[in-house]
Image (cartoon, rainbow, N blue to C red):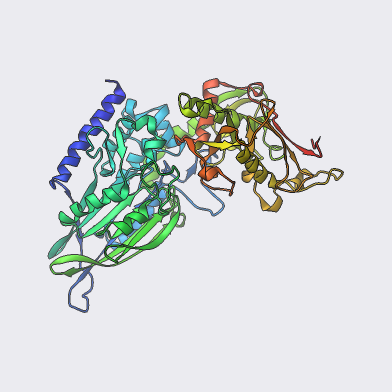
Amino acid sequence: MTAGQCGIATVLGMRSRIGRTLAAGAAAVVAAGLIASPGPASASGAHTVKVTVMASSDIHGNALNWDYFKNAEYDDSAHNDVGLAKVSTLVNRIRADRGADRTLLFDSGDTIQGTPLDYYYAKVEPITETGETHPMARAMNAIGYDAVTLGNHEFNYGLPLLATWTRQMKAPVLGANAVSAKTGLPAYRPFVIKTMKVKGDRPIKVGVLGLTNPGVAIWDKANVEGRLKFLDLVATAKKWVPVIRGLGADVVLVTAHAGDNGMSSYGTELPVENAAALVAEEVPGIDAVLFGHAHNDVPQRLVTNKATGRQVLLTEPGKWGQRLSVVDFTLAKQRGRWTVTGTSSATINTGTVPEDPKIVTLMKRQHDKTVGYVNQVIAESKEQLSAAESPYKDTPILDYIQKVQTDLVSKAIAGTPAASLPVLSIAAPFSRSAVFPAGPVSVRDMAGLYVYDNTLLGVELTGAQIKDYLEYSAKYFAQVAPDAPVDPATLTNAGGTPDYNYDQLSGVTYDIDISRPAGQRIAGLSYQGAPVTADQRFVVAINNYRQSGGGGFPHVTKAPVVYNAQVEIRQALIEYATAAGVIDPSQFADANWRLVRAGVPVF
């Protein structure tokens, strides 16, 4: 066995035993040692108890309020803050306000991937080799999470690293629908039951079922194929919720790494990707669904269960620790058992509080190492490359993105039915201020070129569809008559179209005639010197924002996906430069498109 094989064998063996134990109904209750004081008496004379559940999701490696790519505190246009240090302050305040004995804290996944901090301890100094505690385990253990659920990005760095992180976590790591491909038994703990003691009365039991995303089977196929299978969220919940209720749970929660729109980005070959609301609708016995994956701020959504007619509460706390979901349950004694009689939820902005100094201090050493990493030189550029003119000229610095994307997708589809198709690539001018200086280029320089956290896909399009796509993109330019002066300041962003919604295509040649109206501008579309035909097929490297419908571009949302390993494009650029050691435009610059008026080049 290789080290990797040993790692997965250990994971599957350990988690399968847990699954058998839980399925048998033994050792399922984990006492939290909590004490909840009774609330005020109700009209019927029965007393009530209030329990607060807090939830984060999609932390994506943000421990501190820091932007590693800008080497500064995080800030965005809405002045959000990020990080577990901010979450910790809110958690401490809520515990102090409601009583630590009446609160629980969960997370709905995507924890150990997303920032250079995660990358550093997965790839540069991997915890699987050094024995170092993963920064996210260190922070979450200090904050005191009661359980965390697996997100799809937990699988990005392989099963051995995931197994190491899982062992380092004090909180149970849940994933009921991730099962052994060989035995069908749970590979991770399906659920946990937390017991909250009530003075002078029967304890309250809170059951938590964790569900991860079926898309892992596609997105991380190389890491999980033959090892793990990912089952339908609804079917899995229907199996386990009665077990949890049967073990005496008074409150049943689902923590699901799945959005709530009922749709999938990968078609019908796998169970539904964004099934959080479907779980609430289809599975009786659930009081609330704490979900993630979509990165949306959903303070409260109510869904009616089809079987019971009861409303089930859903909430999602955005991303990166910008929000914390807070759910309040009121329980009353009915027929000798605690019953949920009221629920409400909100999301709280972490930007309203300072960082917890305890977490800041705890993270300092690992944070400082990561800061040093992002400021290190990764390559030497043969000349200065600027993105200043990239919105209206084919510039080498954007061609660098195209080159990396094309090579990555071409390599990935080798040996597949799509391998015979030409690979094209799409990129947009995200930042006019991006520059590779002549000489040393750092990780941060590379990040300044690709400022978004997009991942890479490959989709199949026809020549006719590509023509439509380019026509849509070309509406970015103002119409300018053949004899009129051209002012770059007014040439672009027509109709308010932002730079990031102007896509340039590599691998084919074409002109954009800005003297013509939008929709009639693409001329001379050719591949290797021959006109592109309407039925000609291509694979196009594209980012997940665009493929999922961002910008409203035609055809791509329904195009067959031939590659989707959820590789971060920014990280791919960094790794490509690091491996090459040099950035030489003669190796990738290709002026394949231009602006014209009546066939005459504008520049």
In the image: residue 442, left or right of residue 305 = right
On the rendered image, what quadrant is the N terminus found in? top left
Pick the front one: 463 or 60: 463
Query: Does residue 58 appear in the picture of this structure?
Result: yes
Q: In the image, is 377 to the left or to the right of 2?
A: right
Up-down: is 28 above or below 456? below
Please tell me which residue is depicted at 13% across the width and 69% down the height of the picture: 335
359 relative to 120, above or below: below
Q: Position of residue 123 (x, y in %)?
A: 41, 28
Identify the residue at image location x=40%, y=53%. Answer: 262
The C terminus is located in which quarter? Answer: top right
Residue 41 vs residue 409, the one in the foreground: 409
Q: Is residue 69 left or right of residue 468?
A: left
To which quarter of the image does residue 35 belong? Answer: bottom left
**Of 84 and 282, which appears nearest the observer?**
282
Seen at 35% across and 58% down, the residue is 93
Report which quarter residue 393 is drawn in: top right
Residue 145 seen in the figure:
no
